[in-house]
Image (cartoon, rainbow, N blue to C red):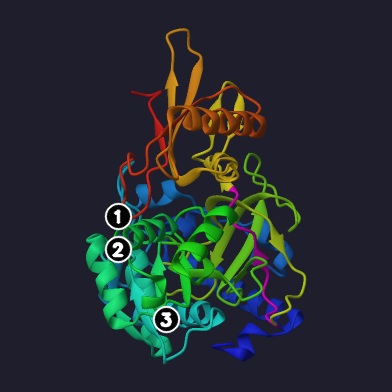
């Protein structure tokens, strides 16, 4: 299924011509209308081909902080109809702004994402993403409404109420973070409810990493087909890319978002099939367009044709991040590596927390708390713990401390799960 067959199946040559036209227009507009870009683009010729993209300057998260709140606007503030922002937990939030045209664009790319998962106007969408400055809830809600589906803006929290509404209303589509999807599955199990009482058919999960093992867990426990989605507030929110029914990567809406992969250290371009940092340029946004935004997400790109018929490049799942990568005793560690290792061990639930501490001798310790799937004897728990520790250590190549705790012992999140607690700076 397609929402916009013409754009989703556009030929590669035609797409690249369109991208170049839009990139050239973007560079001219940014240089004319945004002081930050006027300065950073000074002396740089407009691109003559997409190969010239690498000569253009990057934009970073720090750029948002330096120009907080509205210093990156490319239009008068009076044209802005919606403002969103990041959580700002590490400083001033990154503020993003939308014109009416931007809202229509957001609805378009979200409609493509949902339609790729089979959502139509016949569906009832239970939206468990948080509403507010976070883009998740309102982004998925906008996409569902654009498709014409009945939309329940349930937002986050009040898990028992979510379960009741999904059952009573007959929700066919669930939108949530993967960790909260598992919280909902737990609540259904604890209430003794039969999945046959629910009509869930597909789910769209994003905003945090989701390994294949976690996807399988969600599908099995909620009885649905899970689709990965990707986005970030600085670019537009959810809707940058999403899976089709082939589940072989996330299709990027390339007529609106120009993607490249660069070396995280040098910033030099890498070939698409090489893992590196994803960099995105917003080709059509009006209110707050961005040139070469460094996402800090590590991915690789696949330009091969997809069996679904879409011609857009596909990005891998986010493998990790360049800025939340843990360096423990000189070893690069990504939480997704630990999650994959844990979920490969029978008897463990997909609920865990990673603690990083620094001892007085300045050596780092990595400790992992993970829940057992069911209560068990001390001997059985010790055996699971032994297997899990061995698996994680083989994966990371370093020694770790690992403790298997009882089911439901770890604190549950109503939104993004807190997976890493780094105490080294405390």
**Vertical placement of 112 versus 239: above or below?**
below
Nearest the viewer among 230 and 155 is 155
Q: What is the secondary structure assignment of the residue under circle 2?
A: loop
**Crowd class of label 3 (few under 14; some 14 to 19; many from 20; radius 10 Å):** many
Tell me which label, 3 or 2, sits earlier in the chain: 3
- The reply to whether the C-beta atoms of the residues labelled 1 and 2 are less than 8 Å apart is yes
Question: Which residue position is annotated with label 3?
Answer: 107
Image coords of residue 422 (percent x, y): 41, 30
Describe the element under mark 1 as helix, strand or loop: loop
- Whether tag 3 and tag 1 are in contact, CB under 8 A, the answer is no
Mark 1 sits on what residue?
A: 414
* Foreground pick, 288 / 302: 302
Residue 58 vs 31, above or below: the answer is above
The alpha-carbon separation of the residues under discs 1 and 2 comes to 9 Å
Q: Is residue 293 above or below residue 357?
A: below
Q: Earlier in the sequence, mark 1 or mark 2?
A: 2
Question: Mark 2 — residue?
Answer: 130
| Residues in magenta, as a range | 309-319
Nearer the observer: mark 1 or 2; the answer is 1
């Amino acid at each position: 299924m397609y929402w916009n067959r013409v754009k989703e199946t556009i030929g590669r040559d035609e797409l690249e011509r369109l991208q170049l036209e839009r990139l050239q227009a973007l560079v001219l507009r940014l240089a004319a209308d945004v002081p930050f870009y006027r300065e950073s683009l000074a002396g740089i010729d407009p691109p003559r081909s997409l190969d010239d993209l690498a000569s253009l300057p990057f934009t970073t998260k720090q750029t948002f902080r330096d120009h907080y709140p509205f210093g990156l606007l490319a239009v008068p503030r009076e044209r802005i109809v919606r403002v969103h922002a990041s959580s700002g937990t590490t400083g001033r939030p990154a503020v993003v702004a939308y014109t009416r045209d931007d809202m229509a664009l957001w609805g378009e790319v979200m409609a493509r994402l949902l339609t790729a998962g089979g959502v139509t106007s016949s569906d009832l969408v239970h939206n468990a993403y948080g509403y507010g400055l976070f883009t998740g809830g309102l982004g998925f809600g906008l996409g569902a409404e654009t498709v014409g589906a009945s939309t329940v803006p349930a937002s986050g929290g009040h898990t028992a109420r979510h379960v009741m509404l999904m059952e009573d209303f007959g929700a066919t589509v669930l939108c949530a973070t993967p960790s909260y999807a598992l919280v909902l599955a737990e609540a259904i199990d604890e209430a003794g409810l039969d999945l046959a009482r629910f009509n869930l058919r597909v789910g769209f999960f994003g905003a945090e990493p989701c390994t294949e093992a976690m996807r399988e867990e969600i599908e099995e426990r909620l009885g649905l087909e899970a689709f990965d989605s990707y986005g970030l507030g600085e670019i537009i929110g959810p809707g940058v890319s999403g899976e089709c029914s082939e589940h072989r990567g996330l299709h990027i809406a390339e007529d609106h978002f120009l993607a490249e992969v660069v070396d995280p250290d040098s910033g030099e371009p890498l070939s698409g099939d090489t893992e590196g940092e994803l960099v995105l340029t917003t080709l059509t946004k009006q209110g707050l367009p961005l040139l070469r935004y460094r996402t800090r997400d590590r991915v690789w790109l696949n330009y091969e044709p997809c069996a679904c018929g879409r011609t857009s490049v596909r990005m891998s799942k986010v493998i990790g991040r360049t800025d939340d990568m843990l360096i423990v005793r000189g070893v690069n560690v990504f939480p997704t590596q630990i999650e994959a290792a844990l979920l490969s061990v029978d008897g463990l639930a997909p609920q865990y927390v990673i603690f990083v501490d620094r001892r007085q001798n300045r050596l780092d310790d990595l400790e992992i708390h993970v829940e057992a799937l069911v209560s068990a004897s001390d001997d059985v728990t010790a055996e699971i713990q032994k297997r899990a520790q061995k698996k994680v250590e083989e994966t990371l190549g370093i020694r770790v401390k690992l403790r298997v705790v009882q089911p439901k012992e770890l604190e549950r999140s109503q939104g993004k799960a807190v997976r890493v607690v780094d105490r080294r700076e405390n």
